[in-house]
Amino acid sequence: MSQSKQLPPVEWAISEARVPYPDAVAAMEARAAAIAKSEAGELIWLLEHDPLYTAGTSAKSDDLTDPDRLPVFETGRGGEYTYHGPGQRVAYVMLDLTRRGRDARKFVRDLEEWIISTLDAFNVKGERRCGRVGVWVDRTQPGGPEREDKIAAIGIRLRRWVSFHGIALNVEPNLDDFSGITPCGIADPRYGVTSLVDLGLPVTMDEADMALKTSFEQVFGPVRPVKAPV
């Protein structure tokens, strides 16, 4: 935090209406380019999308198990297939790693810590797993088989050491829509997906946003509200 305290507050925007995915990507790419040229400040952009699948740079065609179910978008972020839809809080992260230390591995761990701290606000224990990107919840019952569910995904891209794309926290999405893909390429039946509401927590999107903001400031530094790009 000592370095982030010396930086200007990160701009914090929330889109109330759902944002079309191509519009979001275009806005992100433009903002990341402006940040790299010192023409704009850092930005966290919270939004929702209509139901869709995105394919990261490591996506395998076999992992799109129901290609006609929802629109599919090729994207430049890292990772494989993932789902976005209503009830999932997407946070697009446009931060300048040149000013924050050019350490991509630490940056991913900080994103994980942001999510874990957010979940802690709802008494949910989010955990990292070696070899499985994202944040997981252990749902193994005493005496039962191992079961872990992903509650948040991470997929980022760096260009000129500016990040874009970001994280997706499952608040109350339609979990059935995940069945059209093999999420993040993990087909093992021990590992699934969950959400805050699926865990029995009636969390609203506004409550999730408040927790995300508080936790972000703990990990990355202060923010200030601005109008959303789209």
Image (cartoon, rainbow, N blue to C red):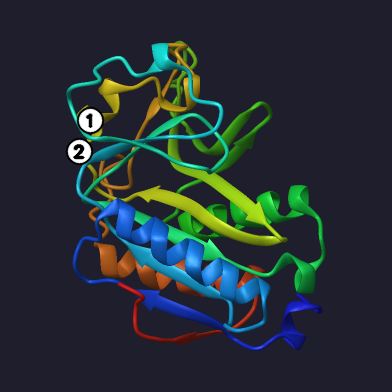
Identify the element where label 1 is drawn. Answer: helix
Where's residue 112, x and y in %? 60, 50
**Real-space Cα distance between discs 1 and 2?**
6 Å
Identify the element where label 2 is drawn. Answer: loop
Q: Residue at x 55, y 52 (%)?
A: 116
Neighbour tally class for label 1: few under 14, some 14-19, many 20 plus, Cα within 10 Å: some
Neighbour tally class for label 2: few under 14, some 14-19, many 20 plus, Cα within 10 Å: some
Where's residue 22, x and y in %? 32, 53
Q: Residue at x 25, y 61 (%)?
A: 19
- 56 is higher (above) or lower (below) than 96: above
Q: Residue at x 20, y 38 (%)?
A: 174
**Residue 99 or 30: which is nearer the viewer?**
30
Task: Residue 23: name its quadrant.
Answer: bottom left
**Mark seen at residue 174:** 2
Q: Are marks 1 and 2 in contact (CB under 8 Å)?
A: yes
Where's residue 31, x and y in %? 51, 71
Q: Is residue 208 left or right of residue 166?
A: left
Q: Residue at x 26, y 22 (%)?
A: 180
Name the residue that disc number 1 marks. 177
- The type of residue carrying mark 2 is Asn
- 175 is higher (above) or lower (below) than 161: above
**Mark seen at residue 21:** none
